Image (cartoon, grey):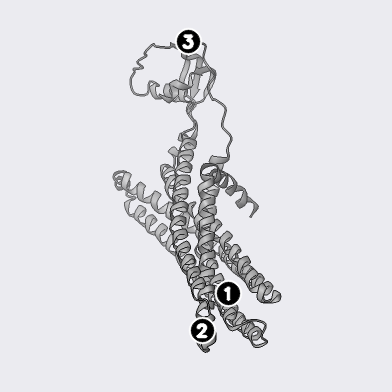
Amino acid sequence: MSGSVADLKPILRLFFAERRRALLLGAALSAATVTAGIALLGLSGWFITATSLAGLSAAAAITFDVFAPSAGIRLLAIVRTAARYGERLATHDATLGVLAALREKLFRGFAEPGAARALLHRPARLLFRLTADIDALDSLYLRILVPAAVAIGAALAASLVLGLMHPLFGLCFGLFLAGAGLGLPVIAGRAARKHARRRAHGIEALRSRTIDLVAGQTDLLMVGRLAAQREAIAAADHYAARADDRLNRVETALTFGFGLVSTLLLTASLLAVAALAETKAITAPVAALGLLVAFAAVEPFAALRRGALELGRTLVAARRIAPRLAVAAAPEPLAVPLPGCTFSLVRVSAFHENSAVPALEDIELTLQQGERLAVIGSSGAGKSSLLALLSGELPARTGSVAAARATLLT
């Protein structure tokens, strides 16, 4: 688990470095939406019950203040609607902005010297990292961090309101709601983690094998491996489908668990407010308020259901991306040339990987600023090797290489 937290650190650091204010604003608006919803439901229940009781007596009906509660209900409804709209705009805009910055930073990481050789063997990996893995990280903020913080805040608010009716009632309600509401998603997340990892691997294999089939169908047909490649694609699809089935089972169990917890909490809350009302500790309108507050406080925890299932996929994506983000800026692979020079090579020899024959041998070349150089030669003469040497993709075995950074970026 500590490794997963370490993988998330560079992701979280980038999240808050890019859009800190927008992310905090989205979380605040989300909390305002939930708080206004709980208050709206509780106040509406109190108002309806108090109004019905006031109607039983002419004197009470005359003195009953209808305008203040109704104005409060309208205000809470407006606040809830506006906060919901603002929360959608703020959270999604901030998340999309962070993911765009993350995608750019990851692309720059894969553009560093040496990365091209690693990706050459599995070209589908870069596409999968830039698309599916990045997209999986939107759940980190939208479905995990914000819903968890809002749910905890809702439990504390409900516990405080119910605690004003009876301290023991509020304490027991808050502890049970927070424990069960957070415990169930954690258990489900641990159960779904393995299946989410298998699903991610299956989808990556499915895409990679499909790309290989489309790009290399002629070669596969010539060697008689076309049918085998189709079977490999079907096997990857079946592997991912089995993982999806397991995830659906975990989600069904989590939904049942939330339903059971909600039923127990609401039943206990109903019995508690009924007992308090019977002993005249609270009035009937206050009892209705407490029951509806307890009912509304359970709702934010249901939002964690999807986040618990996405947690495994998010951790897999973070583990794949974090090494590229967490690595410190590598030192310049090439030395700085002399003033006035664009690049210079001094008795340079270089070898391709797993090759005993030098691709370049005893190369000496100096290009001054403003000069132009045309590199010509037959296929295999070393033109691409020379460019790879200058860009840092091909290391020099002997000699020294110096190049201006501006040259490598043009």
The residue labelled by disc 1 is 294
> Which of disc 1 and disc 3 is earlier in sequence?
1
In the image, residue 357 sits, relative to residue 19, either above or below, namely above
The picture places residue 300, in percent across and down from the top left corner, at 53, 66
* Label 1 neighbour load within 10 Å: few <14, some 14-19, many 20+: many
Q: Which mark is residue 61?
A: 2
Cα distance between the residues tagged 2 and 1: 29 Å
Mark 3 secondary-structure assignment: loop
Which residue is depicted at the point 51% across and 25% down? 395
Q: Is the residue under label 1 in contact with that under label 2 (CB below 8 Å)?
A: no
Mark 1 secondary-structure assignment: helix
* Label 2 neighbour load within 10 Å: few <14, some 14-19, many 20+: some
Quadrant of the frame with the N terminus: bottom right
Cα distance between the residues tagged 3 and 1: 75 Å
Q: Nearer the viewer, residue 100 or 27?
A: 27
The picture places residue 303, in percent across and down from the top left corner, at 51, 65
What's under tag 2, amino acid-wise?
Ala
- Label count reads 3
Q: Is the residue under label 1 in contact with that under label 3 (CB below 8 Å)?
A: no
Which residue is depicted at the point 54% across and 76% down? 292
The picture places residue 376, in percent across and down from the top left corner, at 34, 17
> Which of disc 1 and disc 2 is earlier in sequence?
2
